Amino acid sequence: MIESDCEGFIADLRRQYEKTYPHSGMAHARAKKVLVDGISHGARTFAPYPFHITKAEGAYVEDVDGHQICDFWQGHYANILGHNPPVVRRRLVEALEEGIGLQTGMLEERQAAFGSLLCDAIGGDRVRFTTSGTLATMYAIMMARAYTERDLVVKVAGGWHGASPFTLKGVHRVDGHFDRVDSAGVPEATDKEIVVTRFNAVENLNEIFETFGDRIACFILEPCPSGVGFIPATGAFMDAARELTRKYGALLILDEVITGFRFCAGGAQRLYDIEADLSTFGKVIGGGMPLSAVVGRGDVMDLISEEAEERVWFNGGTFSAHPLSLLAGQTMVKYLIEHEEEIYPALAAKGEKLRRGIERVFADRGVLARCSGYGNDAVPGSSVGGVYFPLEDCAPFRGEEFIDPRCCDVRLREEGLKLGLLLHQVNVVHGLGAISYQHSEKDLEHTLEAYDAFALRMARERS
Ligand code: PMP
């Protein structure tokens, strides 16, 4: 089955989904009257409509139709300890009961204490907190441009760093290419000043630096980009990124918004044994609350100081270092550091079990499907992953191929598999997503049964 002939298969899944999730359908119809497309984030919807929830705990969410859904989206991959983990929730409840938490705009000692915890875990000199990953990457790029007095930003095809004009190019494949601006309304400079390299392609990166080296302000890179299917950067690509940026006087920005505290209790850069000039963090470090940070070299970070001669206006916003976000984030990060040895190997083992199991159930039904998210020479294992349906068995895949319909059946994954699994109360994103520490062996077994039911459905459709 390829994109062109899965129409009937997907239409059938939609009908069954509508029958199974009727109250979500009604809730979504109401939402559409007031919210554009009925949502507040494009990644939270899918056809025919997304389910609406009432509760969330650990590995599960409960929806308005009363289903208990095993969730692998987990707060945009933020909820590494599952939804509403008691260790964080308790601290927030206590704080609110003590009458503290909603008084944003003051200084409290927690800011510096949490800042130094992060710097120690990550390996930077100074930190500035902000509220979203998008803002963190945007400010990091502004700092790199000011520091180097150069214009160009190099990024990876398919790489996602949030929706700021500095990064909105080469995210999606347009007309077969990953070098187009992704949004209307951005300045012309977005096209001119962003150069897109292929992921894990050392030669391509070399060529870019040879061609534009003296104009490049920074290379911004995710150690394991979600947009290209959670394939970790190779050690060679990461080394090339570090060496080329140094050689040409550009800065290396590692965007660790997803990878920070996801692979170990620090940045994934530790696993590669390199240090970025600037790193951006979000998601996990907020403990479920909106919090992000730029961490980095003192001489670069000082550009945002009031004492800087030519200051980068990363001044902060109303909710920067919000007290409840800091409390949740500090509690989470401390917990992860203290329990690193039990949490991360267990998470990686769960990831391995699920990925191998998914490949096995599809293979047993005669369906060609592969998982991404496996470790490599630098990353020993991971709790993230995707599923793809290659048009031919051409693994190992390059990152961009994960989202390229010429190489794999993207629609079957994004629409078919998504709905097929939801019919068995399993919620995935890009075929899988992120496993939390709260996903038990039983949950993984149940999840594999759901994949198997989908594989059987596909096998029947093809016969
Ligand atoms: N960088 C990366 C690697 C991300 O995955 C994301 C969000 N998915 C962002 C930046 C933007 O973060 P936010 O959604 O918090 O603005």
Image (cartoon, rainbow, N blue to C red):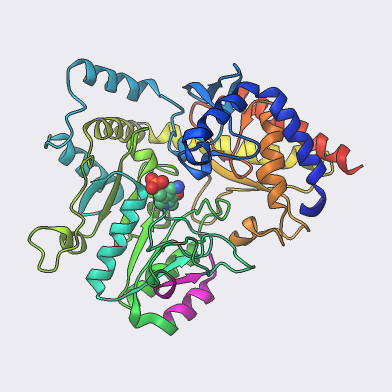
Image-based side of 159 in relation to 25, left or right? left
Classify 360 as above or below 58. Answer: below
Which residue shows up at 47% across the image and 60% down it? Answer: 183
Which residue shows up at 69% across the image and 37% down it? Answer: 357
Query: Within the magenta stretch, is there residue 200?
Result: yes
Q: How many marks?
A: 0
Q: Which residue occupies the extreme right position in the image?
A: 463
In the image, which residues are magenta? 191-209
Q: Which residue occupies the extreme front position in the image?
A: 33
Classify 434 as above or below 394. Answer: above
Q: Which residue occupies the extreme left position in the image?
A: 307
Relative image position of residue 216 (x, y in whole percent): 35, 76
Query: Within the magenta stretch, is there residue 156?
Result: no
Image-based side of 398 in relation to 206, left or right? right
Quarter of the image with the C terminus is top right
Image-based side of 177 in relation to 190, left or right? right
Q: Nearer the viewer, residue 147 or 105?
A: 105
Q: Which residue occupies the extreme bottom position in the image?
A: 211
Any part of residue 259 in sight: no
Relative image position of residue 340 (x, y in whole percent): 39, 36
- Residue 332 lies in what quarter of the image? top left
Any part of residue 190 in sight: yes
Q: Nearer the viewer, residue 185 or 90?
A: 185
Q: Nearer the viewer, residue 388 or 338?
A: 388
Relative image position of residue 363 (x, y in whole percent): 79, 43
